[in-house]
Image: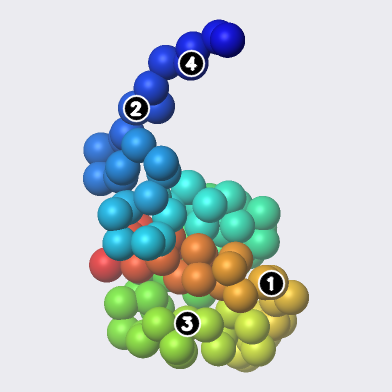
Amino acid sequence: MTRRPPTRATPGSTADGTDGSGGTDGSEGADVFANNCAGCHGADGNSGSAADLSDEVPGKSDSELESVILNGVGSMPGLALSAGDVTAVVTYLRATFP
């Protein structure tokens, strides 16, 4: 039997990739954002043609963010994401745009 070295935790996460509160360390949400949001909002969330997320995210509750993501608002279309992906991207948005 081959032994694998222990997994090392990144700062702010546990060795299993979670943040200790049952959520992910944010990497899943970053991937969801990159694949679904960055095309309009920019990779940094504030350099694209869509709303500047550093202005929009702090003033919204998690449920409001979820609604915008799923249903769209203004010229932004709603996205067909799984509940897990929505939760992951909201977690990422909260960490990135406090």
Residue type highlighted by circle 4: Arg
Task: Point out which mark residue 5 bears.
Answer: none
Q: Earlier in the sequence, mark 1 or mark 2?
A: 2
- Residue 42 horizontal side relative to residue 44, left or right: right
**How far apart are the alpha carbons under marks 1 and 3?**
13 Å
**In terms of secondary structure, where does tag 1 sit?**
loop
Q: Earlier in the sequence, mark 1 or mark 4?
A: 4
**How far apart are the alpha carbons under marks 1 and 4?**
35 Å
Image height check: is 44 above or below 57? above
Front disc: 1 or 4: 4
Residue type highlighted by circle 1: Leu
Task: Point out which mark residue 8 bears.
Answer: 2
- Residue 56 horizontal side relative to residue 68, left or right: left
Q: Residues within 10 Å of mark 2 (few under 14, many from 20)?
A: few
Q: Which residue bears the numbered disc 4?
A: 4
Q: Earlier in the sequence, mark 3 or mark 2?
A: 2
Residue type highlighted by circle 3: Leu
Would residue 97 be seen by someone viewing this image from the given angle? no
Which of 10/69 is in front? 10
**How far apart are the alpha carbons under marks 4 and 2?**
12 Å
Task: Point out which mark residue 65 bears.
Answer: 3
Q: Which residue bears the numbered disc 1?
A: 81
Q: Quadrant of residue 15?
A: top left
Image height check: is 64 above or below 82? below
Q: Quadrant of residue 94?
A: bottom left
Would residue 15 be seen by someone viewing this image from the given angle? yes
Q: Earlier in the sequence, mark 1 or mark 3?
A: 3
Front disc: 4 or 2: 4
